[in-house]
Image: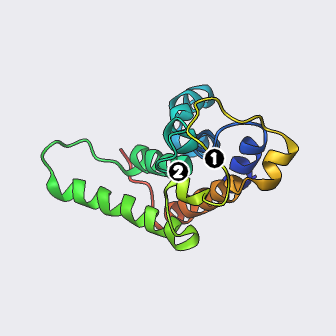
């Protein structure tokens, strides 16, 4: 199963959008699945259902940090290279969906910022486009990883 399929399966099983993408890449990040689920749990619904940055994008950015991120506090070039990487990933997502903002992605739905998540019913999955965003984020990240070998740490 590829990462996009795994991420979509995780989402369809009830994981939030960020958890679905982030956890699908545990084989690449080396993270324990339970740890990955906990770490990414805060980013669903555009960060705690505040409808800000889409959780799938937050997951992409966290994975990019694990794989390619910097640790130096003084290397401006290294920081700039990583920020370019994050902006590239965001732009790739925007190229497909026009925005990385959760509220804008769900503009045609009646969504709110209530912290209580909606029940995952058959109707929920029929109207929610989120699985499409889960797939897009996983595919973008897979393509990026294929084109940019992970540096040895």
Question: Which residue is painted at 77% across and 34% down in the image?
Answer: 119
Question: Which residue is painted at 34% across and 48% down in the image?
Answer: 69
Which element carries disc 1, helix, strand or loop? loop
Locate residue 102, reporting x and y percent. Answer: 54, 52
| Viewer-proximal residue among 2 and 12 | 12
Locate residue 148, reporting x and y percent. Answer: 44, 64
The outermost residue toward the bottom is: 95
Mark 2 sits on what residue? 54
Question: Which residue is painted at 51% across and 32% down in the image?
Answer: 42
Question: Which residue is painted at 68% across and 48% down in the image?
Answer: 7
Which element carries disc 2, helix, strand or loop? loop
Locate residue 46, reporting x and y percent. Answer: 52, 45
- Left of 115 or right of it: where is 12? right
Mark 2 vs mark 1: give the one in front.
Answer: 1
Regarding residue 2, the answer to whether it shows in the image is: no
- Left of 119 or right of it: where is 72? left
Q: Are marks 2 and 1 in contact (CB under 8 Å)?
A: no
Mark 1 sits on what residue? 111
Regarding residue 150, the answer to whether it shows in the image is: yes
* Few, some or many residues within 10 Å of mark 2 (<14, 14–19, 20+): many
């Amino acid at each position: 199963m590829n990462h996009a399929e795994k991420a979509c399966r995780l989402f369809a099983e009830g994981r939030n959008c960020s958890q679905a993408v982030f956890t699908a890449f545990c084989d690449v990040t080396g993270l324990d699945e339970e740890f990955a689920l906990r770490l990414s749990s805060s980013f669903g619904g555009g960060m705690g259902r505040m409808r800000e940055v889409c959780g799938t994008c937050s997951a992409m950015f966290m994975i990019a940090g694990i794989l390619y991120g910097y640790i130096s506090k003084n290397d401006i070039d290294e920081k700039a290279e990583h920020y370019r990487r994050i902006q590239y990933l965001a732009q790739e997502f925007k190229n497909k969906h026009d925005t990385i903002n959760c509220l804008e992605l769900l503009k045609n739905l009646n969504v709110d910022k209530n912290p209580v998540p909606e029940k995952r019913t058959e109707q929920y999955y029929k109207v929610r486009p989120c699985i499409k965003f889960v797939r897009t984020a996983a595919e973008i990240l897979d393509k990026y990883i294929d084109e940019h070998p992970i540096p040895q740490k």
